[in-house]
Amino acid sequence: MEKRNLILAFESSCDETSVAVVADGHEILSNVIATQINSHKRFGGVVPEVASRHHIEQITICIDEALKEANVTYADLDAVAVTYGPGLVGALLVGVSAAKTVAYAHNLPLIPVNHMAGHIYAARFVKPFEFPLMALLVSGGHTELVYMQADGQFEIIGETRDDAAGEAYDKIGRVLGVPYPAGKVIDEMAHQGQDTFKFPRAMIDEDNFDFSFSGLKSAFINTVHHADQIGETLDKNDLAASFQASVVDVLTTKTMRVLQDYPVKQLVLAGGVAANHGLRERLAELLPAKFPQTELLLAPLKLCGDNGAMIGAAGYIQYQQQQFGDAALNADPSLEFDWMPNMVH
């Protein structure tokens, strides 16, 4: 039997501490996730200092659990992969420090992974990628259309100019009194309401592939505040439905437009907001009608949030391409797609 490639992968960019063991880039042997949602709920969002402390408390427990669940030892591993950006600097540093320590102690190659590449490669667990492909990446901090001509090649075709879609969900969640993280609950509310408020669809007709959600957020907040001032009660489900309709309209319209200019074999939907049922349903409806040759690949629901498995999948590609980091690897909170660290080839 041929030896499998085993990667121990770390993810600690925000409020999830996760360690996974991934075989051959597409088989999850373990994917341990320690979430901190309850600690951040009372603040209505992630508090960086609190997140970092949680990561420190959880990381070694997660390593032990991941190895045990996968039934492997350090001696079985081929490499260590870690998210080194983008994200919260203190949170990233915990994962990077742990990964460097394990790699050094067990003489394993270290693979520095871009968190956003990880989100895209979460879809690789569904089936192999076929190129060229387009990824619609929608998360708490990012909304991007990313074109890939080959494994490990990322070209940003469009991105958000202000709030990412996920940020907008959390901000309007506070106004609706929905606990953090608000996305899932607003999605559920939206399915029970109607788009009665007709919020703006920012930049939907502009001749580019960029996004903007701050105007939508302001229109939403102003509508609610105005109603409060005149003592009017608005239907929360309708508010959620109207907000979501705007987000989904803009995302899907821009995506369909980009596919006209960039014909691709697959469209990947990935990132935290990729778990949104309204968005998944609309893409599943539009894509076969407009681009029957393009296959829709949806990242598995349980891998849309931050997790180590996706980092292992992206890390495997870099392992094959011999893109390794060294002891000087540092966290890069504002890491972009077009930049790779000083790789040791």
Image (tube, rainbow, N blue to C red):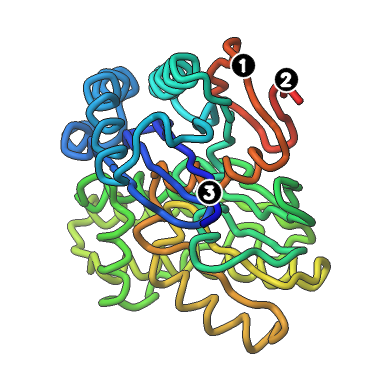
The answer to the question of whether label 1 and label 2 lie on touching residues, with beta carbons closer than 8 A, is yes
Residue behind mark 3: 3
Considering the image in quadrants, where does the C terminus appear? top right
Residue type at tag 2: Asn
> In this orientation, which residue lies closer to the viewer: 154 or 10?
10
Name the side, left or right, on which 138 lies relative to 202: left
> In the image as oriented, which residue stretches furthest toward the right?
261
Cα–Cα span, label 1 and label 2 = 9 Å
Instruction: Write the residue at 59% across / 82% down.
Output: 286
Q: Mark 3 or mark 1, which is nearer the start of the sequence?
A: 3
The answer to the question of whether label 2 and label 3 lie on touching residues, with beta carbons closer than 8 A, is no
Q: Position of residue 38 (x, y in %)?
A: 16, 38
Q: For numbered disc 1, what is the local secondary structure?
A: loop
Residue type at tag 1: Asp
> In the image as oriented, which residue stretches furthest toward the front?
1
| Residue 19 numbered mark, or none | none
The label nearer to you, 2 versus 3, is 3
The label nearer to you, 1 versus 2, is 1
Instruction: Write the residue at 23% across / 69% down.
Output: 235
Name the side, left or right, on which 275 lies relative to 202: left
Cα–Cα span, label 2 and label 3 = 29 Å
Instruction: Write the residue at 42% across / 64% down.
Output: 300
Task: Report whether residue 214 is seen.
Answer: no
Q: Mark 2 or mark 1, which is nearer the start of the sequence?
A: 1
| Residue 326 numbered mark, or none | 1
Residue type at tag 3: Lys
> In this orientation, which residue lies closer to the viewer: 38 or 172?
38
Residue behind mark 2: 342
